[in-house]
Amino acid sequence: MRFIFSYHTHALPNRVLKDYLENHGIDHKCPKEGEVEILSSLSSEKLTNLERHLERYGMQLLEDEKNIFVQRIKNLLIELAYSDKPLTVTLSHYLSTHLGYSYAHLALIFERSTFCSIERYLIHLKIERVKRLIIEDQLPLKEIAGMVNYCSVGHLSKQFKKITGLSITTFRKIILNKKGRN
């Protein structure tokens, strides 16, 4: 059985899955990030237990080919959003090269399935990362902008406000007030 698993953040998803499979003696291999091939048959009980375990971490196993294809796109976008390395080629070229299809085809399938463009999905992921960085650290905005590969704080600020409805400064103040710091 070959599965791809979905996850919403870059939070060690392969490690969670590998640990579970190894601890339960399930023979497997992970050919790529976000994919697993179960090399032996699983009883419906073992499969249900695996799915329940993954749900605790915000993950799920996908078998449907269209969902798997869309999740492969999402997994690449998650990797990009959480990478500190700048993308050296266009997003369209990067995805086309990694998935072996034209960007027009990828964009069409993705948008039909998610009702969101690839670019907008990537922006949402980056803004979620920015929010986490603001919550977890007191890094300067210039450093945060660089970490999520924005060319300027101004551009990041515009995107942040467009997505969240709040300025970064307002968001940061809310977080500081919740933490009891003014």
Image (cartoon, grey):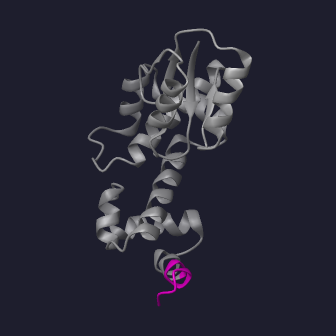
In the picture, measured across the screen, residue 141 lies left or right of residue 158, that is left
The residue at the point 53 percent across, 30 percent down is 20
On the question of residue 108 being in view, the answer is no
Name the residue furthest bottom: 182
Name the one closer to the observer, 49 or 79: 49
Q: Position of residue 121 (x, y in %)?
A: 54, 46
The residue at the point 52 percent across, 76 percent down is 171
Q: Quadrant of the N terminus?
A: top right
Write the start and end of the magenta stretch as one range: 174-182
- Note whether 66 is above or below 81 in the view shown: above
Q: Position of residue 43 (x, y in %)?
A: 70, 14
| Total marks placed | 0
- Note whether 44 is above or below 175 in the view shown: above
Name the residue furthest top: 40
Name the one closer to the observer, 2 or 27: 27
Q: Position of residue 128 (x, y in %)?
A: 51, 58
Q: Position of residue 103 (x, y in %)?
A: 46, 29
Name the one closer to the observer, 148 or 19: 19
Residue 40 covered by magenta stretch? no
The residue at the point 52 percent across, 25 percent down is 21
Name the one closer to the observer, 111 or 11: 11
The residue at the point 36 percent across, 74 percent down is 138
The quadrant holding residue 15 is top left
In the picture, measured across the screen, residue 60 lies left or right of residue 132, that is right
On the question of residue 91 being in view, the answer is yes
